[in-house]
Amino acid sequence: MKTFSYARELKEVSMFFAGKDEVHKTLSRLIARLEKARIAYAIVGAMALVAHRYRRTTTDVDILLNAEGFAQFQELYVGKYYERLPRRPRRFVDRANRVMIDFLVTGMFPGSGLPGPIAYPEPRQVRQKIQKTWVIDLSTLVQLKLAARRWKDFADVVELIRHNKLDESFAESLDRSVRNDYIECLEEKRREDLYEGEG
């Protein structure tokens, strides 16, 4: 069992933000393989948060594919480079370093996975190039996090609002089903700013 070491933790965080940690290595290898196979993708999850100005670490990779791309990924690369996890049909482990990868698939639903007004979209329709890789666009990232209805995702939205200087007008780019949640996150950001004396 690992014991906590502040120095080691600080080094790992520093390596993450320098893009030299194991998670970034897994992401780079995965993107290279997807692009080689011409599989459309969009980076989501915490790595997308970083791309959209909110610097937070993570221990895994999240990627959006459509059903055809997901099937192609499995046919080409599972077994050789990635291992399946029991009872988790869309979670795999990078055999090179044991970093986990979660696949979000077009047409499925965020959060509980139960049908709702917002489903995972086609990656080609909701992505933008950031530092030479395809990342989910900001409005879709916010929308999916709100639709997941988890506290940690709401907290991520608060930080995305802060780091991208978003306001009420941004709600117009979101599905109606999550606009009230977005406004609540915006108000929470403003409450936090007042508490911290930031205006």
Image (cartoon, grey):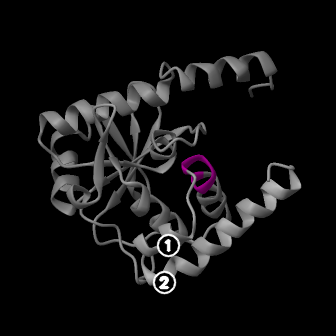
Q: What range is drawn magenta here? A: 160-164
- Percent of width and height locating residue 40: 19, 49
Q: Nearer the viewer, residue 82 or 60?
A: 60
Q: Would you say residue 181 sits in the magenta stretch? A: no
69 lies above or below 111:
above
140 lies above or below 162:
below
Q: Amino acid at mark 1?
A: Ala
Mark nearer the viewer, 1 or 2: 1
Q: Nearer the viewer, residue 37 or 122?
A: 122
Labels 1 and 2 touching (C-beta < 8 A): no
- Percent of width and height locating residue 75: 16, 46
Q: Residue at x 62, y 74 (%)?
A: 183
Residue at numbered disc 2: 177
Residue at numbered disc 1: 171
Q: Secondary structure at mark 2?
A: helix
Image disc number at residue 140: none
- Percent of width and height locating residue 64: 32, 54
**Magenta stretch secondary structure, dominant:** helix
**Pointer 1 local density, CA inside 10 Å: few below 14, some 14–19, many at least 20:** many
Left or right, 133 with respect to 146, comes to left
